[in-house]
């Protein structure tokens, strides 16, 4: 079996190569990007492929020498690649990142809570201006006969064979919103074992909210629950990533008014420092309605934090289905604040870690590779 991998995000190339580097089939890794900015540790294995170049056209012409093509994150270059190979018999797998769909104007409003939308003045006097702008833009594009990203996404999905992702519940939700056009689901294994991370036994009386400064974290929903229940512990807001000055100022203003002992963390940390930082907290609340910062959630699990997710986030249902002890922000957080029950029981810390270890085992990679073999029979 022979697989062509088309990547374009420098940050994640090595992670993907690591998964396939020791498997028993042939892999070619192509860095499909206008700029050759790959700076990882596998430069001997990565072939730089400028779009529309002679080398690119050569790969297109011999695409059927591959059994499978894996596209990591769908962007305009990948859309053109799909168009170029649509008549081939090669199996195409879309390795989903999230932003391809969550970044669509048609989808954004599903992931912002009412509090967040009002705070951003996207909803005022019961008029959803963001949705109104989206509808106006859609009709203008239709009038101008301009092909939008969702057009190319819908067209590409007709040719893509499989949608590679971790969480089937999230896939079902996305597919529903996309009109049931997504390719067949294929379960992806997790990558980061975090096997050297141990829970800090002497945690501070502190709570972490969200994973970044993005307003899709819906920070206000969690802050409101803490304020209503007069939480007296420390509150950490990690804002060093996706920083939006206006939104940060808005959150800071609310937190000051609420009387919470909050701290905005906006300085850069190394990965090891960030794990140590998370490990100091008793609990973490992720109010987002979509999967965001899944790696942060898993660090929290490894560190023994009590994790609260929104009922509207399909990650909650997925992790509970796996058997983990994960809690609902809407149903459990207020009661736990009243009872001062923010620390996860040792037995549940051990349970969550055991389940996570099974999710990142080499056996999960083998299951994926067997799926590959089955689809080309």
Image (tube, helix red, strand yellow):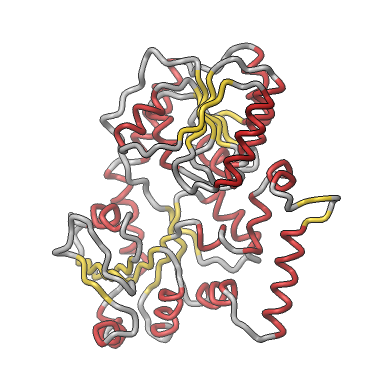
- Which one is in front, 165 or 246? 246
- Which one is in front, 276 or 283? 276
What is the x, y in percent for residue 125?
A: 85, 50
What is the x, y in percent for residue 110?
A: 67, 53
Compared with residue 155, is residue 215 higher up or lower down, i.e. above or below?
A: above
Q: Quadrant of the N terminus?
A: bottom left
In this rendering, position of residue 270 left or right of residue 128: left
Task: Give the residue at x 34% y 66%.
Answer: 8
- Which one is in front, 219 or 248? 248
In this rendering, position of residue 292 left or right of residue 339: left
What is the x, y in percent for residue 39?
A: 23, 59
Compared with residue 331, is residue 335 higher up or lower down, i.e. above or below?
A: above
Task: Give the residue at x 63% y 11%.
Answer: 339
Compared with residue 317, is residue 107 higher up or lower down, i.e. above or below?
A: below
Give the total of numbered labels.
Answer: 0
Q: Quadrant of residue 92?
A: bottom left
For this orientation, the residue located farthest to the right is: 125
- Which one is in front, 344 or 238? 238
Compared with residue 347, is residue 63 higher up or lower down, i.e. above or below?
A: below
In this rendering, position of residue 9 left or right of residue 177: left
Q: Quadrant of the C terminus?
A: bottom left
Task: Give the residue at x 72% y 59%.
Answer: 130
Task: Give the residue at x 34% y 80%.
Answer: 51
Q: Quadrant of residue 74?
A: bottom left
Q: Quadrant of residue 148?
A: bottom right
What is the x, y in percent for residue 195?
A: 28, 32
């Amino acid at each position: 079996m022979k697989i062509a991998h088309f990547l374009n995000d420098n940050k994640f190339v090595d992670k993907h190569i690591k998964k396939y580097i020791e498997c028993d089939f042939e892999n070619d890794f192509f860095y499909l990007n206008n700029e050759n900015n790959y700076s990882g540790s596998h430069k001997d294995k990565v072939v730089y492929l400028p779009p529309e170049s002679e080398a690119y056209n050569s790969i297109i012409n011999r695409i059927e020498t591959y059994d499978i093509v894996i596209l990591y994150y769908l962007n305009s270059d990948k859309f053109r690649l799909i168009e170029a190979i649509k008549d081939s018999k090669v199996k195409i797998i879309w390795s989903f990142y999230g932003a391809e769909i969550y970044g669509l104007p048609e989808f954004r409003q599903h992931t912002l809570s009412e509090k967040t939308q009002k705070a951003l003045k996207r909803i005022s006097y019961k008029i959803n201006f963001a949705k109104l702008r989206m509808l106006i833009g859609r009709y203008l594009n239709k009038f101008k006969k301009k092909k939008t990203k969702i057009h190319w996404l819908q067209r590409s999905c007709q040719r893509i064979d499989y949608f590679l992702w971790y969480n089937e519940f999230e896939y079902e939700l996305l597919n529903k919103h996309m009109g049931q056009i997504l390719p067949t689901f294929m379960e992806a294994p997790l990558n980061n074992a975090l096997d050297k991370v141990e829970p800090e036994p002497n945690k501070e009386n502190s709570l972490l909210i969200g994973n970044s400064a993005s307003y899709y974290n819906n920070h206000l929903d969690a802050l409101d629950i803490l304020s209503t229940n007069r939480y007296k512990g420390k509150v950490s807001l990690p804002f060093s990533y996706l920083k939006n000055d206006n939104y940060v100022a808005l959150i800071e203003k609310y937190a000051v008014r609420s009387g919470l002992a909050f701290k905005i963390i906006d300085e850069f940390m190394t990965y090891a420092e960030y794990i140590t930082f998370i490990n100091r907290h008793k609990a973490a609340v992720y109010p987002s309605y979509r999967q965001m910062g899944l790696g942060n959630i898993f660090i929290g699990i490894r560190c023994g934090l009590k994790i609260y997710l929104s009922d509207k986030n399909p990650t909650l249902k997925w992790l509970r289905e796996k058997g983990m002890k994960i809690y609902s922000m809407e149903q459990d957080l207020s009661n736990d604040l009243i009872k001062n029950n923010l620390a996860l029981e040792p037995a549940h810390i051990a349970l969550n870690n055991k389940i996570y270890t099974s999710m990142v085992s080499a056996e999960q990679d083998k299951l994926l590779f067997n799926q590959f073999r089955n689809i080309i029979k």
